[in-house]
Image (spheres, grey):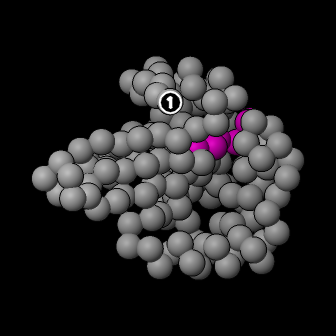
Amino acid sequence: MSALTIRPATETDLPAVLGLYAQPGMDDGAMLPLDDAKALFARFSRYPDYVLYVAEYEAVVVGTFALLVMDNLGHMGAPSAIVEDVVVDPGQQGLGIGAQMMSFAMAKAAEKGCYKLVLSSNAKRERAHAFYEKLGFRRHG
């Protein structure tokens, strides 16, 4: 896949993001009302290191994930990061979008000096877990 752009989401991306979340295996057809999503987006946009990202291909949002970087007193003050809500449009899966998004998240965590990156994913998402394991993630808990 060529010319994939990964960027911080804006409020105008929320309908596309909610559509991605509604797919089976994520929110299973349920969709947060747009006004609620806008309020939550405004709230977490004020957090210093919590960013919702979108992946765009030919001006269409085809994937999304959230990255949170947290300060730490342990590990000599090195922060840690969590990536969650990783979703790719079902029609675009298998084209490398998820791998590019995860590489982007790993690079951002490294840029911030994180000593680890944790991936949060529902245990029921078996295909997603197989994908994450190919990227070097290990299951815990």
Q: Quadrant of residue 17?
A: bottom right
Question: Judging from the image, what secondary structure is the residue with disc 1 in?
Answer: loop
Q: Residues within 10 Å of mark 1 (few under 14, many from 20)?
A: few
Q: Position of residue 135 (x, y in %)?
A: 42, 26
Residue 74: x and y in percent read 20, 52
**Residue that numbered label 1 is attached to:** 141
- Closest to the observer, 93 or 117: 117
* Amino acid identity at mark 1: Gly
Q: Nearer the viewer, residue 91 or 70?
A: 70
Question: Is 74 positioned to the left or the right of 107 in the image?
Answer: left
Residue 116 falls left or right of residue 39: left
Q: Percent position (x, y) of residue 49? A: 38, 66
Q: Which quadrant of the view contains residue 32?
A: bottom right
Q: Residue at x 70, y 29 (%)?
A: 124
Q: Nearer the viewer, residue 29 or 94?
A: 29
Does 54 lie within the magenta span?
no
Q: Which region of the structure is painted magenta?
A: 86-91
- Examine the rendering and report whether any part of residue 18 can be seen: yes
Q: Residue at 82% across / 69% down in the picture?
A: 33
